[in-house]
């Protein structure tokens, strides 16, 4: 039987963390792109795309991420796609992130007051020009702090992919815990690594928000 | 390959799903109640309590908010026995949910407390009420009212997050889906059904919490 | 013997000294108006008497007992001295009746029925017996302030401090609140009021205190203070037609 030293455990966990990081980045970037598309559909002039986006948000925010992972994992298989845990994890996390990001961003666009719309309309701008030159630039400033804040949720969300067999930090933790018989140390360390990833993002989001509030 | 969906077989599993729903509801009922209570205590400690209490509470809140619930659950269930604290699955799941919700609720409720006008504290003080009495009778209810929608959302988030307690063999709704799919090998249908049930639970739980809010906070907003 | 005795009271906020040595005594049953420009320290003085601000130096004695620090001493003081605020500060989640009952139940530990009977008496006294079950949001500003007065009276204080109690009210609602204060004065309640209502001060008060730059600048009966101001500062203040 192999003996695991503290250093063994720590290096193994840190090495597995790169997958947590990579998956987080993929989910955040992919989710952001998808959310951007959904946002433009939602804030356009037509009514029904907005309703569809709201339904999308309702479904993905109203069901467990774990279920979404299962459905992606088994559903993609039904479509005849050879599903690796990585693919299923990416797909589910992108869809899930997009639902939260589009909701955050839509809120920021809505937060731009009527006065701005009226003033730009008075200058003869059309809807597209109002959006492009007046509303979106202001909404973008509002959107940065909560978007950074949501990135914390994404990092934590990747932990669930261990359940469909993706080998990231949490999965490495369960494997090491079983092999080393040191669950207290292993899961304590796993928690601390997640904390080290998430806490700076949380602090950053809070700082940005404070700065924004002072500026206003 | 063409796959034909078949949901009919699931009918025979309804008792399993019903028991799963009952467990999920039990967890969120106890976890929600105790979690909000813990959140109130921590929010008080951070905004109005003594420094020596506020600092450790802040550490607790940040630790929980910046680590995954799944790891908190594993730490409690697998890790704590090393310290001599061995909990059953349901106990561990409930404790994890209380600790998790407590941290988020603390931040939400703190925002409600800190939005209290200074005059409310002064009015309480001028009536010779102690600081604790002022908090309990004057500050707390309007503070909860201010943030109730956010708190309700957080309870729903914790309920949805509780899907992972099946990982420590708690027989909740996700466990029922796992059980059904392992017997039938029709995973997609089993998870699709439980996803729809979760969605229904989320909508119902939110509605129930908002209803409850209407009962706790009767003061009308309308001016005369 | 005086009910409230203030000696050498000083209070600073940061580097600004707001109270620069106040000496004042108020007899039981006396009605005292504190006037002065904004920033002269009137409200701070009142808040010190109720322990909402802690003085840097000096002594405040109420009914023979010195104001101390610590929650227990402050609460003992506040049982003797009630306070009415400019912004009413009613509890929005409680009805008018519950606002009046609350301290009675919580602080004095009285049973509900007893507190309720007293609350009804107090609300009747300010002419709002019919509004027992109304929430503050359903009341006008004048009615809210009268509930606040009933709430303070329910603690049976030896004196009431009134901090610009009509300043937040629409002009047409000022009269009903001053009417209640006038009745309290007539019933012999000890009142110390910071006010901008000069006509009311002249009519109701036994004594007027003019504060200027953190000091008691002039004290006297209203007739003297308003008709024959001795100092140029008071003369200017009175001339500005407050």
Image (tube, coloured by chain):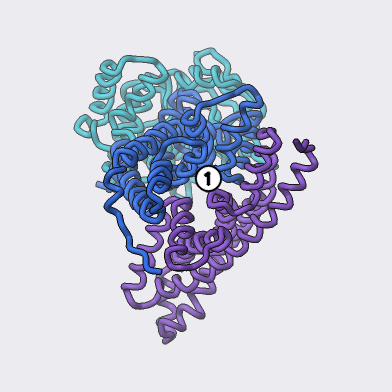
Chain colours: A purple, B blue, C cyan
Name the one closer to the observer, A39 or B85: B85
Of residues C182 and B138, which is closer to you in this image? Answer: B138
Residue B23 % position (x, y): 38, 35
Secondary structure of the residue carrying tag 1 is: loop
Q: Within the image, what quadrant is residue B208 found in? A: top left
Query: For residue A84, what is the image quadrant?
Result: bottom right
Compared with residue A56, is residue C234 higher up or lower down, i.e. above or below?
above
- C15, B161: nearer the viewer: B161
Does residue A161 sit above or below C185 in this rendering? below
Q: Establish if A120 lies above or below B98.
A: below
| Residue under label 1 | C37
Is B101 on the left or on the right of A44, as rendered?
right
- Pointer 1 local density, CA inside 10 Å: few below 14, some 14–19, many at least 20: some
C234 horizontally vs C80: left or right: right
- Which chain is mark 1 on? C
Instruction: Name which residue lies at 31% across and 15% down.
Output: C111
| Residue drawn at point x = 35 percent, y = 63 percent | A55
- Report how many numbered discs are placed on residues in the image: 1
Residue at screen point 65% across, 24% down: B83
The residue located at (33%, 41%) in the rendering is B17
Q: Where is residue A143 in the image (x, y as percent from the top left)?
A: 54, 64
Residue B60 visible in the current orientation:
yes
Answer yes or no: is residue C36 visible.
no
The image position of residue C125, as x and y in percent, is: 26, 26
Seen from the viewer's position, the closer of residues A57 and C82 is: A57
Residue B80, above or below A137: above
Q: Where is residue C7 in the image (x, y as percent from the top left)?
A: 61, 23
Left or right for C25, reference C158? right
Furthest-bottom residue in this view? A124
């Amino acid at each position: 039987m192999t003996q695991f030293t503290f250093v063994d455990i720590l290096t193994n966990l840190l090495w597995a963390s790169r997958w947590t990081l990579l998956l987080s980045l993929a989910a955040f970037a992919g989710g952001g792109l998808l959310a951007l598309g959904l946002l433009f559909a939602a804030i356009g002039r037509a009514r029904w795309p907005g309703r569809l986006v709201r339904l999308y948000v309702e479904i993905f925010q109203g069901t467990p991420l774990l279920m979404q992972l299962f459905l992606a994992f088994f559903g993609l298989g039904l479509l005849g796609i050879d599903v690796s845990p990585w693919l299923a994890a990416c797909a589910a996390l992108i869809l899930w992130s997009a639902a939260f990001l589009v909701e955050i961003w839509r809120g920021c666009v809505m937060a731009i007051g009527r006065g701005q719309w009226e003033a730009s309309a008075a200058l003869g701008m059309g809807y597209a020009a109002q959006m492009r030159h007046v509303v979106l630039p202001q909404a973008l400033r509002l959107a940065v702090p909560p978007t950074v804040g949501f990135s914390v949720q994404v990092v934590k969300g990747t932990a669930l992919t261990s359940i469909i067999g993706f080998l990231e930090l949490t999965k490495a933790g369960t494997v090491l815990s079983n092999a080393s018989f040191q669950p207290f140390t292993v899961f304590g360390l796993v928690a601390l690594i997640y904390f080290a990833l998430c806490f700076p993002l949380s602090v950053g989001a809070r700082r940005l928000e404070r700065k924004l509030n002072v500026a206003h | 390959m063409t796959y034909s969906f078949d949901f009919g077989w699931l009918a025979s599993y309804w008792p399993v799903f019903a028991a799963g729903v009952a467990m999920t509801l039990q967890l969120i009922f106890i976890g929600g109640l105790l979690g909000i209570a813990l959140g109130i205590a921590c929010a008080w400690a951070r905004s109005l309590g003594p420094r020596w209490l506020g600092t450790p509470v802040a550490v607790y809140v940040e630790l929980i908010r910046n680590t995954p619930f799944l790891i908190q659950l594993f730490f409690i269930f697998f890790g704590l026995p090393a310290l001599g604290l061995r909990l059953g699955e349901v106990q561990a799941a409930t404790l994890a949910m209380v600790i998790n919700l407590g941290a988020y609720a603390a931040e939400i409720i703190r925002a409600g407390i800190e939005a209290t006008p200074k005059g409310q504290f002064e009015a309480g003080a001028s009536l010779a009420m102690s600081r604790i009495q002022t908090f309990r009778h004057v500050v707390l209810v309007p503070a909860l009212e201010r943030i109730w929608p956010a708190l309700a959302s957080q309870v729903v988030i914790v309920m949805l997050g509780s899907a992972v307690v099946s990982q420590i063999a708690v027989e909740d709704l996700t466990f029922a889906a796992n059980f059904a799919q392992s017997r039938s090998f029709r995973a997609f249908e089993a998870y699709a059904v439980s996803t729809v049930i979760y969605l229904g639970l989320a909508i119902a739980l939110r509605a129930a919490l908002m209803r409850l809010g209407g009962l706790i906070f009767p003061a009308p907003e309308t001016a005369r | 013997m005086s009910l409230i005795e203030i000696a050498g009271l000083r209070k600073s906020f940061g580097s600004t000294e707001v109270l620069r040595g106040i000496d004042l005594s108020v007899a039981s049953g006396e009605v005292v108006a504190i006037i002065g420009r904004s920033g002269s320290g009137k409200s701070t003085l009142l808040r010190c008497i109720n322990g909402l601000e802690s003085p840097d130096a000096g002594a405040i004695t109420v009914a023979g007992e010195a104001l101390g620090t610590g929650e227990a001493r402050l609460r003992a003081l506040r049982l003797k001295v009630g306070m009415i605020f400019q912004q009413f500060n009613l509890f929005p989640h409680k009805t008018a009746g519950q606002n009046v009952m609350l301290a009675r139940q919580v602080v004095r530990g009285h049973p509900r029925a007893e507190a309720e009977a007293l609350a009804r008496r107090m609300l009747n006294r300010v002419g709002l017996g019919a509004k027992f079950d109304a929430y503050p949001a359903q009341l006008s500003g004048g009615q809210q302030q009268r509930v606040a007065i009933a709430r303070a009276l329910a603690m049976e204080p030896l004196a009431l401090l009134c901090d610009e109690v009509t300043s937040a009210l629409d002009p047409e609602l000022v009269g009903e609140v001053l009417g209640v204060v006038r009745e309290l004065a007539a019933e012999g309640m000890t009142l110390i009021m910071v006010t901008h209502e000069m006509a009311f001060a002249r009519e109701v008060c036994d004594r007027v205190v003019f504060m200027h730059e953190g000091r008691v600048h002039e004290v006297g009966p209203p007739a003297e203070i308003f008709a024959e101001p001795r100092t140029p500062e008071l003369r200017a203040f009175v001339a500005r037609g407050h």
